Each structure stands twice: as C-alpha cells, then as structure tokens.
Amino acid sequence: MGRPRLLVVSMSLPVTAKRVGEESWSFTMSPGGLVSALLGLKEFETKWIGWPGVDVHDAVGKKTLSVALAEKGCIPVFLEEVCDQYYNGYCNNILWPIFHYLGTPPEYRNDATITYQSQYDAYKKANQIFFDVVKEHYEDGDVVWCHDYHVMLLPQYLKEYNSKMKVGWFLHTPFPSSEMYKTLPSRSDLLRSVLAADLVGFHTYDFARHFVNACMCILGIEATSEGVVDQGKVTQVAVFPIGIEPERFINTSALSEVIQYMEKFKNDFGGRKLILGVDRLDTIKGIPQKYQAFEKFLEENEDWRGKVMLLQIAVPTRNGIGEYQKIKDQCHGLVGRINGRFGSISAVPIIHLDCSIDFNQLCALYAITDVLLVTSLRDGMNLVSSEFVACQKAEKGVLILSEFAGAGQSLGAGALLVNPWNIKEVSTAIGEALNMSPEEKERKHNINFQYVKTHSTQQWADDFMNKLIEITTNAELQAGNVPHELPEHDVIQQYSKSNNRLLVLGFYGALTQPMKNQERRGDGLNLELHHQLKERLKALCSDPKTTVVVLSRSEKSVLDKNFGEYNMWLAAENGMFLRHTSGEWVTKITEHMNLEWIDGVKHVFKYFTERTPGSYFETSEASLVWNYEHADAEFGKAQARDILQHLWAGPISNASVDVVRGGQSVEVHAVGLTKGSAMERILGDIVRNKSMTTPIDYLLCIGCFLGKDEDVYTFFEPEVTKKTKSVPSSGGDSPKKVSSTIIDLKGENYFSVAIGQTYTKARYFLDSSDDVVQLIHKLCTNNNA
Ligand SMILES: O=P(O)(O)OC[C@H]1O[C@H](O[C@H]2O[C@H](CO)[C@@H](O)[C@H](O)[C@H]2O)[C@H](O)[C@@H](O)[C@@H]1O
Ligand SMILES: O=c1ccn([C@@H]2O[C@H](COP(=O)(O)OP(=O)(O)O)[C@@H](O)[C@H]2O)c(=O)[nH]1
C-alpha cells in the first residue's frame, strides 16, 4: 500500500509572500523551527496549507498568489480581517504566553479595548477558514496533520465534517502544567477539540503528561495507557521529539562558499572566542537573561575581556505585538550598557543583529562557534541547538542549553544544562565552556552528534505518520466491531443446547438496581442486588449445567451479603479473592505482591474525603477507590487532581500500582488487577473444583466495566481460546497447561455484553441491568421449557 497523501496545516506557510506587481509575487523562507522542521518532510506527497504571510484583498491577487504557491506545493489560507485579532491577538498574545508560563499579558486586565472574547471569536473564525480550505482540497485517504496552537479547533471541525478523516495534531510549543493552562477561559473547548484528533503529539513526556493531566482535571475524563478516553473515544497521546535534517547542515557547512564565510568571520572577529546566540527575538528566548549572564561573566573574569564576544542573531518576529517591541528595546538597552562598560575602541563584546541571516552564513557561524548559548525561558524544542551540533567542525564548540528547552531532554547529556533565570549559574557555565579541555569538548560533542544524526526530521515525521496510520487503521477495524444489540434469540437457543456453561457476571451496573434509580447511601455506592433478580438468580445457579461467577471490584463482605445464598462463585476485589459460596475465601494475592502502599494511599483518600463533601472511599485488600460522583462536580475534579499529585509525590512514588482515573473516581490498585488477568488466576480453580469433564461450551460475560477491565471480554474470544490456554495450577504461581478442550468456544456460543456502553471490546450491548434481569429470566424459563 502506498503512502497516503499528507495535508500539512499550519498557521504559516514555509514561504512568506511579497507582492512585487499586480500579478507577480516574490517569496522568502519563513522563520522559525516549525518551518525548518517540516521542510524535511521529503518522503511524503505533501500539500502545505497555511497563511502566506500577507493580506490579499483583491481577486486577482488571490488567484495569482494561489497559482504561484501551487508550484511550491502550498495552498494559501486568506485570513484577511481576522488575521490581526487571530494571530497577534489570540494566538501570540494569549495562547503563546500561557503555553510558555508567562501568563496572560497585563493589558487584558487593564485595557478595556483589548478583549479576550473578540480575539477568541477571531480564533474560531480563522480555524473555520482553515477548515474550509482543507475541506476543499481533501481527498479520500489523505492524512491531515494539524500543527500547533494556531489550529486547536481544527481537529473537531474536521472530524465533525468527516469522521473518517485521519487527523493528527502536534504541538511545537510546551504544553504547560494544568495549573497554568486552566487560567485560559476557553480551556475546555480547546481540549475537547484537540481530543477529536486520532493522535496528539508533543516534543517531551512532560508536555504530554501536562496535557493528559489537563484533560483529566478540566474535562474530568479518564486517562489510560493509550491516551485519553472521552465519551468512549480514545485519543492517543504520544511523544515525538522533533529533529533536524542533519545532512542539510553537514553538507552545507562543507561548501566552499561556507568555508570562505568561516575564514572571513574568523578574521572579522579578530581571533576572539565566539559565543553565538540564534533566536527569534521572542519574549521566551531569554535574550535579556543571556546578556545579563554575559555581563556578569565579563564583570567577574577580567582576563577574558577583549578575548571573547557574543554575537546574537535576533531574528525579527511578531512585530505587531507590544511585548515584542518592548523586548527589542530592552535588549538594545542592555547591549548599549554592556558594550559601554566593557567595549574598547577596537571591539565591543556584544554584537546584536535585528535581522535574519542567509542559510550559508548561518552554517558558517555555527561551524566556527566556540559556545552556543541557549537561554530560553521555555521552548518547545529549540532546533538551533541541533543545527549547531550538526555544523561543528574540527574544534568542537560547547553547547550551553537551558533546562527549560525541550532539547534539554535530548541533548542534555552532551551539553552544560543551565537555569537561565540564574544569572550566576549561566555566567559560570560560560567560563566552564570557554575553559573546557579539547577532550571533554570532543566527548560531549560526540554524544550530541550521534543523537542529532540519528534523530532526523524525517524520522520524526515517519514516526508520527506511522503511528497515526496504525491508529486509524486499527480504528477502522474496530469500527467493524462496534457492539451489536444482543441477539437474544441466539443467546437463549445456544444456552439450551449447551451442556457446560460458564456465566461471568459483573456486579455494579450489571446486577444492581439500574443506576438512574439508585439511591444515595451517603457512604458509597448502593451495591444492592436488583430486586427482581433474586428468584431468577437462584434458578440460574441451581442448574447443574451452569457455573456462575460474579467477578467484581467489590470486597468480600459485599459479595457475601448479596450472593452468599446462591450456588455460585464469588471473585472479590477483581479476583484477588475467590470462593464458592459453599466454601471459604481463598486468597489469590501472591506472596511477592507488595501492598505496603495501601496505608499511605488510604491516608490521602481519608484526608480528601473529609474535605470533599459527598465524596467517599472504599478500601479493600489490594485496591482503593475514591469516588466523588455525589460531590460538587467541579470541586470534585479539582480535588481528584490534587489527590493524584499527592499520591505520585508520596505513597505510590515507588510502588507497583496502577492508577485509574475514572469519570468521577480515582482508583489505585496493585499492578495487573484487571478482570481479564483475574480470569487467568481463577479459571483453573473453578474448572478443577467442579471436576469438569466436558469442555465449557457456552460463555456469557456481562458487565459494566472500566476500560481496563474490558480485557475480560477479549480473554474469552474464541480466537484466543482456540489455542491451548494456560491456567495457573491450584497451589502455585507456575502456569499449568490445560487442554484446549477446557473451553470450546467457536464464536456462536460466546457472548460478551457491555451494559450501557457502545464503545467497548464486548461484542454486544444491553442498555441496563433491567435487561440483564429479563435475559436471565428467559434463560431459565426457556431452558426448563
Ligand atoms: O511563525 P512565528 O509566529 O514567527 O513563529 C515561528 C515558530 O515558532 C514556534 O516554533 C516552535 O517550533 C519549533 C519546532 O518544533 C520548536 O523547536 C520551538 O521550540 C517552538 O518554539 C511556533 O511553535 C511555530 O508555530 C512558529 O511558526
Ligand atoms: O535568520 C535565521 C536564523 C535562524 N533561523 C531558523 O529558525 C529556526 C529556529 O527554530 P527553533 O526551534 O530554535 O525556535 P523557534 O523559532 O521555532 O521558536 C532554526 O531552524 C533556525 O535555523 C531562521 O529561520 N532565520
């Protein structure tokens, strides 16, 4: 199968257009890492959809520009009157500062003419315009890859239009901690829209974790190992650290023109050591902090004065925003002061250039640089550091890298990591870098060079695209598996025909009073058997051909109370304890299962229960659950978030546990405590105890289970059971092979049923426990008829 066509959608096109005549246009490359990165996408047939960097109001202009861009594989999005409020306003003055931990700029608090709402409206409108363009160019099978915070509403618009579209969203900036993100007024809309995508990607695990946390805290939805589940829809969240196109830099820095530049620059700099900075002149790049650190270094290292210089390429960006004007003035002021203090007639210590530079010159500078100084206060990745590493020549330079850049995680091992806010620390790092031995420089460089060479943009794009295609293909397969209405007739007929039936029943939601009628007991869920079930269950369990197991998260006493009188198996705490109602409880907790974390977790749950009216927690021997379904929803969510933070920081930081964030609950349990894994543990006991001589030839599994527990449905899938099943022997941990004849399911005699869920691994669904009651009734009566 060929690769799908790729529609890349980003705010800016890789080229910025300039009108040079009624019908003619010139183009320059747009600045910034996103453009550099995506230019490396060579393996895909790609169309790039974005803003051409210029407002065009006339039809002739739009047409001629579209034609000129088409030759470059680009499709323009004309934003016209919304552009300023959208790009300068909402994107770069609200989202950008919040995503980079700068918070909302003060003008939103002080100036009544700047309104958040009008800028958000422009953001919505602009996303709608992007959507219209994608819609116009989309062909079946295309992958739509949305980039960055400018198009957070686009995934939802696309999926609402065509749910089959393969949609990915990647964020090039940091995603902040939920504490910062939640200050954003439109926080929920944006999250929900992004979750419409099939795959959401970030540069680092921190950003991905923050995003998942924000979804849990703000939307109150469940996180699983795969990603985030919202109303049954799974959005995968994954980490894809971006790279550069190393060959482009390596090859360019070997060009004779570049070598000439290198000689020229060295000559110009008069033998002084070169510290280089290459950044857009952005508030987040920490350029003033860089200057202050360099000033401190010169202050404290008299010997180095006149022997070292700092060249800062400050690429102009976002000139329409006040904060960017201010930072420019601030930098100019600092440079003036420092040059005044430490300059001489022949040389100044800092050269600050408000311009972008030609690519060959950039590579030449990277190649002769002694120290690259990156002091970003926050940065999604920072490609400049990788580019520097790729261009380094004979005398290896040293990378000083902010720990707040995503690159810190990838290149930290070969860099001097610094906190850019700590001027003294950066100044010391400058000294360390300048005095570093050639061997140490070489060692550090080799580590980073190896990384940069093997983690290319192409690799990054391949990884993202492969994952997206895998997810969407699986989703298509899964789509054929959406649960059907239970074929009651078949369920009953197969039941009558069979000789050795196993019924695995959940308790909560499946055998309890229907949830809508449930009365609050104050201290927890009303785990009370459905009133109409009692007689029917008795009849069901008394049939010698039928084995009934209630497999529940509930503790032993709850199952004893509700089911003690029936002839059945009880598997409490998700199979940690098992008993036939005629016998004693047997523990399935193995000796090596460490449960020392329980008390600490209980302590945290108790604390929050006392402070969250309406919440409660349940403790059992290998799991605890804190539930806030009867508490104030917003407050409950906030408390759940705090609980998680406390737990991770303390009682479970080193424990072998799974944490499950349910819709309105937080559950902590020993690793592997799912209903599917429980079946592994208990099936052998049940089979042996009953001395079954004929294989189980009918299986009905009904539950209202958490996502993680749905593995019990797949456990019994006939495809699986065709093979020999491994069932633990009664006494120990070592699996004993049990003949495949123990379970003989062919497909028509296996029914997995989810209650009230249409996104499930079960084959069928029923609406409520009332339906379960009816079904059990029919099974008994038809069987006896
Ligand atoms: O187009 P501008 O508004 O001038 O901004 C330029 C780009 O800046 C941001 O780049 C980010 O992407 C880089 C590559 O992933 C990453 O290394 C860097 O840390 C980020 O800041 C922004 O996210 C892009 O949308 C802009 O185009
Ligand atoms: O005059 C210049 C100097 C540099 N760059 C490029 O701008 C990008 C900056 O990317 P980075 O990830 O470091 O930060 P961003 O600007 O995207 O926040 C790098 O690829 C640089 O090569 C540029 O476009 N023009």
Image: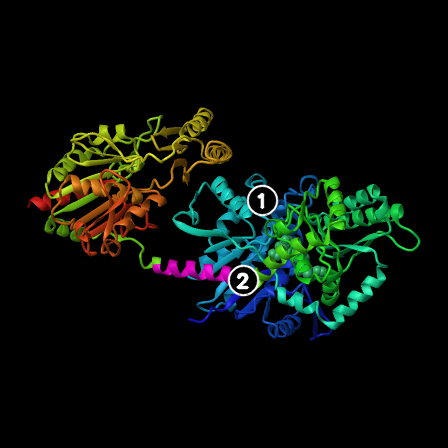
User: Where residue 94 appears, x then y in whole percent?
Assistant: 63, 47
Three-letter amino acid code at disc 1? Pro
**In this rendering, position of residue 103 left or right of residue 2:** right
Q: Nearer the viewer, residue 669 or 319?
A: 669
What kind of element bears circle 1? loop
Q: x and y percent of residue 389 in the render?
A: 67, 58
Residue 345, numbered label:
none
What kind of element bears circle 2? helix
Q: What residue appears at the point 33 percent right and 42 percent down from the top-left corner?
A: 674
50 shown above or below 610: below
Give the extent of the magenta segment. Answer: 461-477
- Residue pointed to by mark 1: 176
Q: Tell me which numbered mark, 2 or 1, is placed earlier along the sequence.
A: 1
Type of amino acid at the residue the image marks with label 2: Gln
Apparent side of residue 530 relative to residue 150 in the rendered image (left or right): left
Q: Residue furthest right?
A: 345
**Residue 166 found in image quarter:** bottom left
Give the spatial CA distance, label 2 vs label 1.
26 Å
How many marks can you see? 2
Q: In front: 528, or 311?
A: 311
